[in-house]
Structure formats: C-alpha cells, structure tokens
Image (spheres, grey):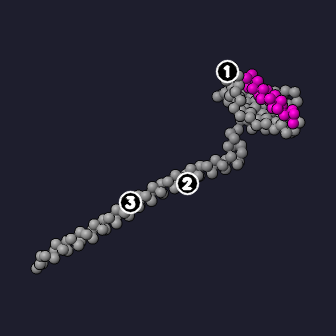
Amino acid sequence: MKLYSLSVLYKSEPKAILLKAAYDVSSFSFFQRSSVQEFMTFTSQLIVERSAKGSRASVKEQEYLCHVYVRNDNLAGVVIADSEYPSRVAFTLLEKNPREADPMCKVQAELDETKIILHNTMESLLERGEKLDDLVSKSEVLGTQSKAFYKTARKQNACCAIM
C-alpha cells in the first residue's frame, strides 16, 4: 500500500496546468526516478483533461491506480498509488479541506488566528500607552501652569488688604 504522487491541477481549456505536486519515488532506482516522475505528471494532466467538471474517477494505468477529483471551479486533485491503496482514503484526501483533514493544520490555523488577535491587542495597548503618556505630560504642564497662576494671584492679592 503506497502513495506515489499527489497533484493539484487547474483544468483550463487547452490543457491542464500543474499547480503543485508531491512525489515519493524513493522506491524506484535512482536512474528511473526522473522518468517515473515525468510519467506521473503527464498521466495526471491527461486524466484531468479527460475528466468532466464535478466528477471523480479511478483509472488504472499500468500497475498504478490514479484517483482524480475535478471540482466545479476547475480545480483538480490527482492521487497516484498502487492498486492496494484504498480508493475511499484517496478520495477523502482529495475532497477534504486540508485544514480539516490534518489536526496539525487546524491547530496551526488557530495559532495563527490567536497571533493576529494578540498582535492587534498589543497595538491597541501601545496606542493607549501613547495616549496615557500624552495625558501625563499635559497634566504636568497644567500642574505647572496652576502653580504659576497661584503664585501670581498671591502676589496680586498681597498688595491689597482684605477687611
């Protein structure tokens, strides 16, 4: 039971465009690896081009089983595995949102969201700190001005006698 290739393609009119692919060709000899990878890329593109929108299928090519799923928005996924690999698992892999399929991705997404919230909170705290610094400096200026006013008023009132 082995998974050899996982590809994401875009089904455009003249031909399918490979967006991203991952290959595991470690079980092949060093000299075969590049040609096996080219075969998998070509087969993935060909299967996507021949599949209809919104469809999923399994195609046997030599000793490999190719599972394809083409969404209605022309995004397609292809899994190439050996014949022992369960097709249900392959289609679950192709149809599921990666964030839901992998618990680590879900945790990472939650961490990213928490980091954004924390960053925004820190920014607002810094802004409040700046506003507090402005208020402190204004209150110091106001305190100094009130002392000057008090001294001036005392001098002014000293000349007059209060009865």
Judge left or right: residue 87 versus residue 128.
right
Please tell me which residue lies in front, 41 or 81. 41
Q: Residue at x 30, y 68 (%)?
A: 144
Which quadrant would residue 26 be assigned to in this image?
A: top right
> Percent position (x, y) of residue 123?
49, 54
Tell which circle, 2 or 3, labels the residue nearer the N-terminal end. Answer: 2
Secondary structure beneath dot 3 equals helix
> Percent position (x, y) of residue 14?
69, 20
Disc 1 designates what residue?
13
Q: Which numbered tag is attached to residue 134? A: 3
Secondary structure beneath dot 1 equals loop
Q: Which numbered tag is attached to residue 37? A: none
Callout 3 amino acid: Asp
Q: Residue at x 16, y 74 (%)?
A: 157
Magenta region, residue range:
30-50
Q: Is residue 33 above or below residue 106?
A: above
How many C-alpha atoms fall within 10 Å of the one at disc 1: few (<14), some, or many (≥20)? few
Magenta highlight on residue 34: yes
Callout 2 amino acid: Leu
Instruction: Check the image and name the residue furthest to the bottom.
Output: 163
Disc 2 designates what residue?
118
Between marks 3 and 1, how big is the CA–CA gap?
Answer: 62 Å
Instruction: Check the image and name the residue furthest to the front.
Output: 31
Instruction: Determine if residue 107 is in view.
Output: yes
Instruction: Determine if residue 83 is in view.
Output: no
Please tell me which residue lies in front, 123 or 78. 123
